[in-house]
Amino acid sequence: MLAEQIHDYLRTFFSVTDCEILEDTPNHLTVQLTSDIDKRIMNRPFYWQFVESTKAQPNPLKVTFITKRPENQEIRGEYIHYGSTRMHQIFQATKDLGSFVQLYENEEGASLFPWIGANFKVSYHTDQTKEMLFSLGINLIHGSVKSNFQDLLIGLKLTNELPRNAYCLPYIVSPMRAIERLETAIENYIANDDMTWADEAKKRWEREQEILDHFYVGVEEKPEIYEIEKKALEERFQPRIKIEIVSGGLFYLK
């Protein structure tokens, strides 16, 4: 499921940024990058400095991103996953380029319903990190929430201009209120999720604390270094949850 989410996210990212998708299979994407996206995610500053200083013809990369390793099949490319440097660069590029968009379903003469869509990244942090991506949409008229909203968008033809003779229905639920409801949905998921990871982190924390205390048995007044190391253990093992909106938008859909 996570591999599929990554694949969908990459497909949307490259489509929106005008990169040509040359090959799209369940396991990988081959993309011809634009010069701008190459600069943002491919770590070639010296190449681009040379191109700009000499006014040479730019040659942005064609890249294959492998989202799932298939059995008995050799694919040459870069394996991309949550936590990988490349994925973080793509998240950052999304933010830099403007994480909020307004798009319309390309249907002439249609009445278009307003939706807020948001991609949430949920991170469970201790001495280990787990990251998950959730794509949710909420209808701004009747308030229904749809999971895997990005999957819906991928199957539609979207444009940044209102189609001819199309009409945008006015929303009843405000966009800010809609975002709050989506955040509540994410929080409810977390509240019902398995928190074993946090319990296990606390046990590791206790073991490390016992080892630290062992070195200071019989020491009535602990030195400053003890407090520093104790604080470091807390920062390392204390379970933390971070919810972040990676990208989102206002979508008018038929």
Image: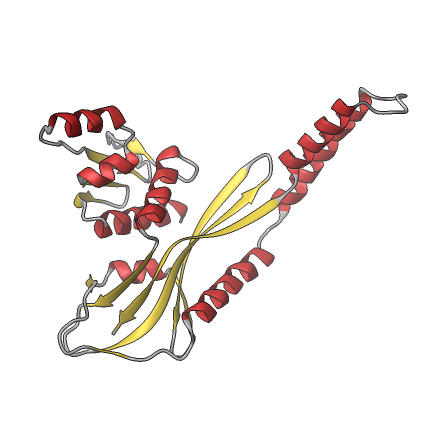
| Relative height, residue 109 to residue 68 (above, below) | below
| Relative height, residue 237 to residue 12 (above, below) | above
- Please name the residue shown 70% across and 34% down the image: 205
Quadrant position of residue 57: top left
Colouring chosen for the image of the structure = secondary structure
Q: Residue 220 location, x and y as percent?
A: 90, 24
Q: Residue 60 location, x and y as percent?
A: 17, 34
In the shown orientation, is residue 218 left or right of residue 36?
right
- Please name the residue shown 68% across and 36% down the image: 234
Q: Residue 58 location, x and y as percent?
A: 13, 32
| Relative height, residue 60 to residue 93 (above, below) | above
In the shown orientation, is residue 115 left or right of residue 44?
right
Any part of residue 35 in sight: yes
Any part of residue 192 in sight: no
- Please name the residue shown 48% across and 44% down the image: 131
| Relative height, residue 64 to residue 95 (above, below) | above
Q: Residue 80 location, x and y as percent?
A: 34, 36
Count the marks: how many? 0
* Residue that protrudes farthest toward the front in the picture: 53
Q: In which quadrant will I find the C terminus?
A: bottom left
- Please name the residue shown 35% across and 38% down the image: 89
